Image (tube, rainbow, N blue to C red):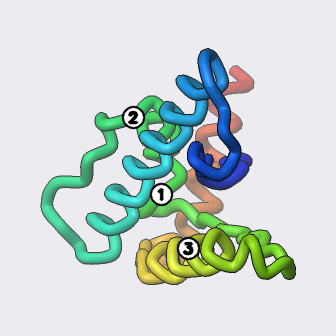
């Protein structure tokens, strides 16, 4: 999923439909951050239902999933705050532990079984 970063409404000066879109992007990123926090701190409740984005990513976060977070940073000084914010987000995401590497062979066999069943 390409999240394209947060939208700094004051910086971009968007209005109307673009403003609503920016607000929705920011809400989704906030919800994703809350899910990552809950997973990293092994909380009982993980708020996947707070956003369509986190509902869609539920099977990709934690559990047996492997998730890669790629952070793009800007070398321009005007974007330093956004770059730092993105790096902090990535640092939080790196705290999430999952069981993907614990049973790799078992997971591969399960995947093969599911694929064979789907072909039938």
Q: Closest to the observer: 4 or 55?
A: 4
Q: Position of residue 8 (x, y in %)?
A: 60, 51
Which comes sooner in the sequence, label 3 or label 2?
2
Numbered disc 3: secondary structure: helix
According to the image, label 2 marks what residue?
51
Q: Position of residue 26 (x, y in %)?
A: 50, 44
N-terminal of the pair, mark 1 or mark 3, is 1
- The mark that comes first in sequence, 2 or 1, is 2
Q: Position of residue 22 (x, y in %)?
A: 58, 35
The residue at 25%/53% (across/down) is: 46
Density class for disc 2 (Cα within 10 Å; few <14, some 14-19, many ≥20) is: some
Q: Secondary structure at mark 2?
A: loop
- 86 horizontally vs 64: left or right: right
Q: Which residue is mark 1?
A: 61
Image quarter of residue 72? bottom right
Task: Give the mark toward the camera: 3 or 2.
Answer: 3
């Amino acid at each position: 999923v390409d999240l394209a970063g947060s939208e700094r409404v004051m910086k971009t000066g968007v209005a109307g439909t673009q403003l609503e879109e920016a607000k929705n992007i920011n809400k989704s990123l906030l919800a994703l951050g809350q899910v990552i926090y809950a997973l990293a701190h092994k909380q009982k409740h993980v708020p996947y239902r707070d956003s369509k984005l986190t509902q869609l990513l539920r099977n990709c976060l934690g559990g047996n999933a492997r998730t890669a977070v790629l952070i793009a940073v800007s070398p321009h000084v005007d974007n330093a705050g956004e770059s730092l914010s993105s790096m902090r987000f990535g640092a939080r995401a790196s705290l999430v532990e999952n069981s993907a590497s614990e049973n790799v062979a078992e997971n591969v066999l399960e995947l093969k079984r599911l694929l064979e069943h789907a072909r039938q």
